[in-house]
Amino acid sequence: MKIGFAQVEITPKVGIELAGYLGERISTKVDSPLYAKALVFKEKNKQYLWLTLDIVAVDYHFYNELKRELEVRLYNFSDIQIIATHTHSAPKGVCETKSLQDLFGEVDVAFLRHLAISSMRAVKNAVMDLDDFTCSVSQKEVQGVAASRHDPYIPLDNVVTTFQFKRKEKEPILLYHYPVHPTVLRADSTVISSDLVGGIAHHLPEFKNQMFLNGASGNVSTRFTRKGSTTREVKRLGKIVATAIKESLTEARDVAMDEIYALHYSYDMKKRELPSLEVCEAQVQKATKHLEQAIADNLQDPMEIRFLQSIVEGETMFCNLIKHDDGLPNQEIHFAIVVLGPIRFIFMPFEIFSTLASKIDCDNCIVVNYANGYEYYLPDKSAYEMEYYEANMTYYEKGEGEGFINFINDKIHALNKRLDKKHKEAATS
């Protein structure tokens, strides 16, 4: 098997509006560049593409358009995975999701075209960069960066998993996976930035080729760990993750990446019964009054202010969900399991809660959020019971997250049985 990597800068001009938070945020400067990064695997005559973009989300529209563009240019990939890093300091207009226009903006055709052209350049260069490789895997717990957005004392998967691909003739490639909302920069920031991902890269200059995959981060962020919302704080937290990556590499174990293939699935997610728009708008007014009163009372706790802001955002977005609901009882969800050697990467279009992902019965599985579409938050049952912001930001019925995990477990168990049978047959042949 061979592997290739390339990146192309996609940073827009200053003055573009930024995505991710309510309200207008016009960018005033560039703090760190944004990239389209392509990772290509080639096994015999088949090629597989993983493309990451420093944007807030990727929707089905862009995913399908880019697939068609690549096919027109005769890039015959056996499988394509397109993943957003989920920075909130990149341009609006990258998604057609009408119910989230307040956060994501209306479609910016010009920037999407720029994104597609840049992505294709990255893919072309990655294909030209193919080389033989060996792979090592390492893990390290990270302290002081990611925590539950609701209670910092809730235990979480705080592990960064790093794959180092050492190549025969070319520079190594670093692929790391870490579950966190990479959003140190808050709504008052007007800088263009890859945010935490850029902060990590700043402290890994020895690795020219590096790619970030986000994990099960629906309920995970830096809300309780950051000491401010500044570019300096981005670098401080980035250094912690980068240091963990470097330390883990000293204890890396070699793994045989002897095969790669992708399996695609669909799942019908049951949608919940929605209240009337009038009821929802009354909830927005109530949440807004609570926030305004806290500000008027000169509440000094920034985390409490952010919590109240998130309630307003959640209720506002819920009203938008109601406005744009298609009336169908179910939502068809597409996801993929990519087998890479002994590892199973599960690419899904959600912001799934870590409490759900932890119930996947698979020690060698890597959950990747924000992949090949954007289908809102996928909370656990308790998030509905506690009326968390994320539970308001989704169409799905309470318990559907648990049902989805059961479905994944069935597929993983069936896959493992097939692989065990295949390996036994190979050993006796």
Image (spheres, rainbow, N blue to C red):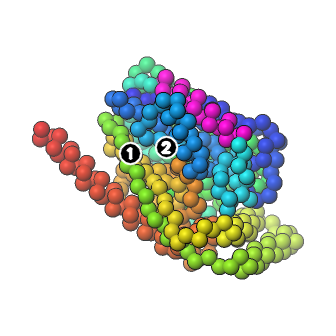
Q: Residue at x 67, y 47 (%)?
A: 94
Q: Residue furthest left?
A: 428
Looking at the rendering, in which quadrant would you find the N terminus? top left
Amino acid type for the residue under numbered disc 1 = Ala
Towards the viewer: 306 or 396: 396
User: Measured along the vertical axis of the image, is residue 50 above or below residue 229?
Assistant: above
Judged from the image, the secondary structure of the residue bearing numbered disc 2 is strand
Label total for image? 2
Residue name at image x 48 percent, y 27 percent: 127
| Local SS, label 1 | strand
Where is residue 14 shown, x and y percent of the image?
80, 38
Query: Is residue 325 in sight in this rendering?
Result: yes
Image position of 426 with respect to 375: above or below = above
Q: Which labelled disc corresponds to residue 334? A: none
Q: Residue furthest front?
A: 72
Q: Residue at the far right: name it.
A: 296
Q: Earlier in the sequence, mark 2 or mark 1?
A: 2
Q: Is residue 103 left or right of residue 129?
A: right
- Badge 2 vs badge 1, beta-carbon distance below 8 Å: yes
Task: List the residue tagged with mark 2.
Answer: 81
Q: Which residue is mark 1?
A: 262
Q: Which residues are magenta?
A: 110-129
Q: CA distance from mark 2 to mark 1?
A: 10 Å
In this view, the residue in front, 370 or 381, is 370
Q: Percent from the top left, x then y, of residue 396?
A: 54, 69
Q: Is residue 207 visible?
A: no
Q: Amino acid at mark 2?
A: Gln
